């Protein structure tokens, strides 16, 4: 039986139109490069939106997946399994957390975190301790609960009524938070760096003050490290550099290096509120995902790998600054590690998609963080030659877009 031919046009015929994929279909990846159906080659600064942590088809991850696939795929949570137990040990040994819950995605990890925060508040302080405070422009996933906690109205519109008891305040605005936090607050939820909101880092003083406000009001501090975690910022998790320890942390994206897996990490006292039957996930903690994620964490034990993140950050920022010196297209370049945002100057606000499309034509793949910001989330081990080549292609794309307008 022959394999049916498919193309980008097939998507429009058979897929729900909630996505609008680029006009290519990648079919092969190796390291920081991709090839499409026509054999065209691309340098990948997108990394599957901060997912392909060690590039495409890293040999050690391929071996971990293949080895586990020959042993055990799925059991359900009627049983536990060795890869899940080992991965949980790795995470608790290398973070603040005492307990881990595994799932399949960032949204599921956040769903679990928000449910746990409410359950903990209910268990310890009563039914009135249920309010969650989040930040404007934040992004926490696409389930009904997570779009409610997320601070972008566009993701909630048309899905109302959404769950109640959620308040949003401006990011990095301590006084705004101080005005709304109360004895009814069960949790404050924040990203150490807002990713989808435009690559906006938390001010360290703000982050530390949020921790204190949570303590003063007996509220849990939840860190969404879906995008910033697993070495992305140069630390295993971004909370470390901020000098703030959360009560709950969520992780996904890069955790599996490209294989779907999510995790919620928490303190033992908090975990007690998820007693038997309180929450679950059919595929969460499956042996395949946990085996691959375990290998990712093993590789990240190499201090040179994490040190290389800062070096690559400097190379990309320096290259973007050079592009900007010649074209005056970026208002600000910000971020940490290999989560970098380049905000377009105001006359080009709303036009980030043009640079994405022209970059693809020139053979370089980048992302957006909203309509005003180009986002870069490449492999943590992207070769320096690929960085240079990719930035050169990006500069050609910038020139083409500017010349055409």
Image (tube, rainbow, N blue to C red):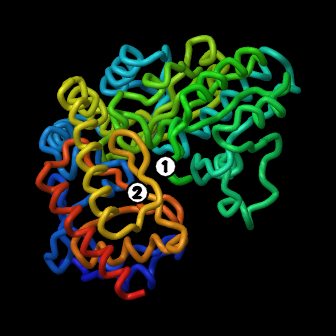
The residue under the point 41% across, 73% down is 21
> Closest to the observer: 111 or 176?
176
Rendered image: mark on residue 392: none
Instruction: Find the residue positioned furthest to the bottom.
Output: 404
Asked if one can make out residue 108 in the rendered structure from this viewpoint, the answer is yes
Give the percent coordinates (x, y) of residue 306: 25, 30
> Closest to the observer: 2 or 288?
288
Tell me the quarter of the image containing the C terminus: bottom left
> Closest to the observer: 15 or 191?
191
The residue under the point 75% across, 16% down is 218
Give the percent coordinates (x, y) of residue 230: 36, 33
Q: Do callouts 1 and 2 mark residues in contact (Cβ within 8 Å)? A: yes
Q: In the structure shown, which secondary structural element does the residue marked by tag 2 occupy?
A: strand
> In which quadrant of the rendered view does residue 292 lie?
top left
Rendered image: mark on residue 199: 1
Label 2 Cα crowd, 10 Å radius (few <14 / some 14-19 / many 20+): many
The residue under the point 47% across, 45% down is 105
- The number of discs equals 2
Asked whether, in this view, residue 95 is left or right of residue 165, the answer is left
Give the percent coordinates (x, y) of residue 305: 20, 32
Residue where numbered disc 2 is placed:
375
Gap in Å between the C-alphas at discs 1 and 2? 8 Å
The residue under the point 25% across, 67% down is 364
> Closest to the observer: 66 or 35?
35
Label 1 Cα crowd, 10 Å radius (few <14 / some 14-19 / many 20+): many
Vertical order, 27 against 102 (above or below):
below
Tell me the quarter of the image containing the N terminus: bottom left
Instruction: Find the residue positioned furthest to the right.
Output: 128
> In which quadrant of the rendered view does residue 381 lie?
top left
Asked if one can make out residue 281 in the rendered structure from this viewpoint, the answer is no
Asked whether, in this view, residue 368 is left or right of residue 6, the answer is right
**Mark with earlier residue (1, 2):** 1
């Amino acid at each position: 039986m022959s394999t049916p031919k498919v193309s980008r046009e097939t998507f429009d015929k058979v897929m729900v139109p909630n996505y609008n994929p680029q006009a290519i279909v990648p079919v092969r990846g190796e390291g920081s490069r991709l090839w499409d159906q026509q054999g065209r080659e691309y340098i990948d600064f997108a990394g599957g939106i901060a997912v392909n942590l060690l590039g495409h088809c890293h040999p050690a991850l391929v071996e971990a997946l293949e080895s586990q696939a020959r042993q055990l795929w799925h059991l359900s949570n009627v049983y536990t399994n060795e890869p899940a137990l080992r991965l949980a040990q790795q995470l608790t040994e290398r973070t603040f957390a005492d307990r881990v819950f595994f799932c399949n995605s960032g949204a599921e990890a956040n769903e679990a975190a928000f449910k746990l925060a409410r359950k903990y508040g209910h268990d310890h302080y009563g039914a009135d301790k249920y309010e969650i405070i989040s930040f404007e422009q934040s992004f926490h996933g696409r389930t009904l609960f997570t779009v409610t906690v997320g601070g972008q109205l566009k993701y909630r519109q048309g899905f109302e009524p959404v769950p109640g008891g959620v308040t949003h305040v401006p990011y990095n605005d301590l006084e705004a938070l101080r005005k709304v936090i109360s004895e009814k607050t069960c949790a404050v939820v924040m990203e150490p760096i807002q990713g989808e909101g435009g690559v906006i880092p938390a001010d360290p003083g703000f982050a530390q003050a949020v921790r204190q406000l949570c303590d003063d009001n007996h509220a849990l501090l939840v860190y969404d490290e879906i995008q910033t975690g697993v070495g992305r910022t140069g630390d295993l998790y971004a909370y470390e550099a901020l000098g703030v320890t959360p009560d709950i942390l969520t992780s996904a994206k890069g955790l599996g290096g490209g294989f779907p897996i999510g995790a919620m990490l928490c303190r033992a006292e908090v975990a007690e509120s998820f007693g038997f039957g309180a929450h679950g996930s059919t595929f969460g903690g499956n042996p395949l995902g946990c085996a691959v994620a375990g290998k990712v964490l093993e590789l990240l034990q190499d201090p040179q790998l994490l040190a290389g993140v800062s070096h690559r950050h400097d190379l990309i920022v320096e290259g973007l600054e050079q592009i900007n010196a010649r074209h005056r297209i970026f208002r600000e370049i910000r971020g940490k590690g290999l989560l970098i945002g380049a905000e377009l100057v105001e006359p080009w606000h709303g036009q980030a998609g043009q640079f994405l499309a022209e970059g693809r034509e020139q053979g370089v793949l980048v992302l957006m963080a909203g309509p005003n910001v180009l986002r870069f989330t490449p492999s943590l081990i992207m070769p320096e030659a690929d960085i240079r080549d990719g930035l050169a292609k990006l500069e050609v794309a910038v020139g083409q877009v500017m010349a055409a307008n």
